[in-house]
Image (cartoon, helix red, strand yellow):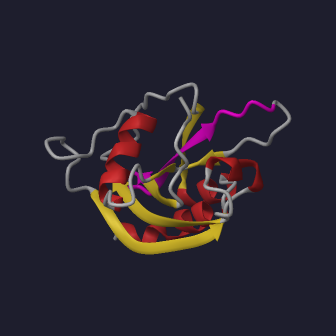
Amino acid sequence: MPVPYKIPQSVLVLIHTPALEVLLIRRAEADPAAPAFWQSVTGSKETVQEPFAHTAVREVAEETGIACGPGSPLHGQLRDWELENVYPIYPRWLYRYVPGVVMNTEHVFGLQVPQKVPVQLDPREHTAYQWLPFAQAAARCFSPSNAEACLLLPRFAA
């Protein structure tokens, strides 16, 4: 059965502690020569109608095992930063989108957790995680928009 094309609308969720330590996860890559792709939680909407906040809650749970939706202790800690990044889709991932789609719109959220918490990764998507001070996390991110979000953390965590 063919996999449906991805929607070019996604979320970036910067998970952090009150001490401004940021969770980064490393993407699993089939190419052993590929650089280490460290990033925050990201993911596309499942439908065009899905609210960005629902996408954020779903992706955080899928990629880290951290529950932040209604009924969880972290409910209410997900903050919409009301920032959007529009950027070209990396050529290596264009095949996932409808032919001709080359740009993605990324909506940014922050999720504060009380302290560094262990996460549960899906090894098909991510192979490692680490907690870093926000400036070090920014330097480690492969995505410029993710690095920028890390550097903006002091402004949004206050």
Q: Residue furthest right?
A: 33
* Location of residue 53 with respect to 132 vertically, above or below: below
Magenta stretch: includes residue 16: yes
- Specify whether 99 is left or right of 52: right
- Which residue sits at x=81%, y=39%? 34
Q: Quadrant of the C terminus?
A: bottom left
- The foreground one among 26 and 93 is 93
- The foreground one among 100 and 38 is 100
- Which residue sits at x=56%, y=25%? 123
Q: Position of residue 12 (x, y in %)?
A: 48, 57
- Specify whether 136 is left or right of 57: right
- Where on the picture, by quarter, is residue 32? top right
- Which residue sits at x=45%, y=66%? 107
- Specify whether 104 is left or right of 68: right
- The foreground one among 97 and 30 is 97
Magenta stretch: includes residue 148: no
* Location of residue 88 with respect to 123 vertically, above or below: below
Q: Residue furthest left?
A: 71
Q: Position of residue 138 (x, y in %)?
A: 62, 59
- The foreground one among 33 and 20 is 33
Look at the image and give the residue range highlighted in magenta.
15-31
Q: Residue furthest top?
A: 123
